[in-house]
Image (cartoon, helix red, strand yellow):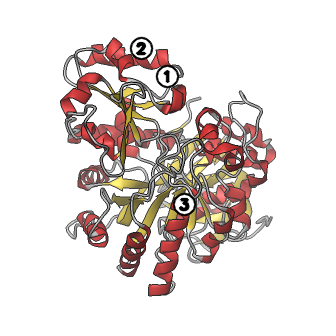
Amino acid sequence: MALLLSGAIVAGSAAYAREADLVLRGGVVYTLDASRSRAEALAVDGGRIVAVGTRDDVQPFLGVGTEVVDLDGRMVLPGFHDSHAHPIAGGMDALACSLVEARTVEAILAKVRECAEASGEGWVVGAGWDLSLFPAANPHESLLDAVVPERPVFLEGADGHSAWVNSKALALAGIDHATSDPPHGVIERDRATGEPSGTLRESAVALVSGLLPAPSAEAQRAGLRHALGEMASFGITSMIDPVVGPGELATYDQADAAGELTARILACARLEATGPGLARRGLDAVALLARPARPASPRLRTGCLKVFVDGVLEGETAALLDPYLGSGSHRGMLNVEPQALAAALGSWDAAGLQVHLHTIGDLAVRVALDALASAHRANGPRDQRHHLAHLQLVHPDDIGRFAALDATATFQPLWAYPDSYIEDVNLEQVGRARVERMYPIGSIHRAGGRIAGGSDWPVSSMNPLLAIEVALTRRDPAGDDPDTLNASERVDLDTMLAAYTRNGAWLARQEAITGSIEVGKAADLVILERDLFAISPHEIGEVRVARTIFGGRTIYQLAP
């Protein structure tokens, strides 16, 4: 690893004409540049990095107006990039009836009762319940009826692909024993009676969610403000939001215009439905976000499209090459036919769109990679930076295809340990052999694939350091379970720091602006309490962010 010892890298001429706004010195500056160099100091002026080097090298940048921070051995990194999260929706969930912290069924029901009492009348809406707390991830309506009998209840699951509703909500939606499953959706049913049980999967969720009042513009703004505060506290200065419509884009626009957007956002349009006219509808969805009247901004970009190729394992809607155990021939569901996806992706690729593909099951991964290969054959190599997200199961035959097709693998590394979802739900669904090849971060990396990191917040914690710890250890970061999920898929610290910095910046087409600490780039920086290379991997998730800097401006500082 290179160590920059002398001769600061300075913008412009060797004699800088003005004092810097900020100097950080006396620490470990891990630049994440191409040579992975280290320095001990840097200078920032006008929102950009103007010098990187030794303590002596930044001395000429000091002046009476310079803020000087003595790092005392702390670590400086480029600001973290979260390549898959939902800040507006997650922020609104956190400010409403959040069930994320409810660790038991009893705690969930107590929270729902509390939310009902606080909200007064109408719908009781919440999100974040833990699917693994219920047999087959299938909670019953009767549990909700017991705590909220007279009002409709809609609770989105932590997976974002399931909902739990009470009998009042089912009645309002007209869902009964005679209601057929909608295309690409499942109405879970009581095995004894055939009546709807209260759990809905995938497109069936919309049968009830479509009845909910639309969130107000102010609720969306408040949700975004909350999310930006969370992001800053975790050192995140860039994020890809893969599910954006005109309303969400307007929220981002307003925050940007007001100077409140303290992160660089790539907003991807969601393709809501599949079927005939897929290619045209994808182009139209992105066009809705590409309003010519919106001025260009270094903080907000569009031009990408999100496609759900399949669902999730917990609801048995993820598409698998081999059947779910005990289900006969059931292999989940593809949301789009392979030939239709290949044709549409070829059109999107030719039009210059970046495509973000939700892929959980190994069949979905193969179909997505096949579609990318078809686009390569039709259009030739193009710099569209397509990526596959989640990748819970990837067949060994497809591991090397990520590098060959220049397809980025966007993992949520915090999921890659044997938690209750995997041990209590997935294991019974797919068996130990498939569980032991889940989240193949190491295999794809060793095969030359590009790895990016994301949280899928609010599905799981936004904290990149927790996710990095799990990627290195494949164990529960809380230390409650000593078991390991496929130790051969561990990776090293440099790989994961790159995933959350320079690779994330590249994926969002921001590599000329941010992602590494280099002269001329934006001063998007995070200061950590400790040098991550000097501690055990099992301690990384406990390290706190001391300060987050975005474009040279401090947006978070740890209280003394």
Whole-number angstrom distance, CA of label 3 to CA of label 1: 33 Å
Q: Is mark 2 on a helix, strand or loop?
A: helix
The residue that label 1 is drawn on is 102
Q: The C terminus appears in which quarter of the rendering?
A: top right
Q: Badge 1: few (under 14), some or many (20 or more) residues near its Cα, within 10 Å? A: some
Q: Which residue is drawn at 67% across and 56% down?
A: 440
Q: What element carries label 3?
A: helix
Q: In this view, does 442 lie to the left or right of 19?
A: right
Whole-number angstrom distance, CA of label 1 to CA of label 2: 9 Å
Please state the horizontal and vertical placement of residue 283, each as a whole percent of the image.
Answer: 29, 71
Q: What residue type is labelled 1?
A: Ala
Badge nearest the viewer, 3 or 1: 3
Across the whole image, how many numbered discs are drawn on residues? 3
The residue that label 3 is drawn on is 363
Q: Quadrant of residue 32?
A: bottom right
Do the residues under discs 1 and 2 have CB atoms within 8 angstroms? yes
Q: Is mark 1 on a helix, strand or loop?
A: loop
- Asked if one can make out residue 53 in the rendered structure from this viewpoint, the answer is no
Q: What residue type is labelled 3?
A: Leu
Q: Badge 3: few (under 14), some or many (20 or more) residues near its Cα, within 10 Å? A: many
Q: Quadrant of residue 308?
A: bottom left
Mark 3 / mark 2, whichever is N-terminal? 2
The residue that label 2 is drawn on is 110
Whole-number angstrom distance, CA of label 3 to CA of label 2: 39 Å
Q: What residue type is labelled 2?
A: Ala
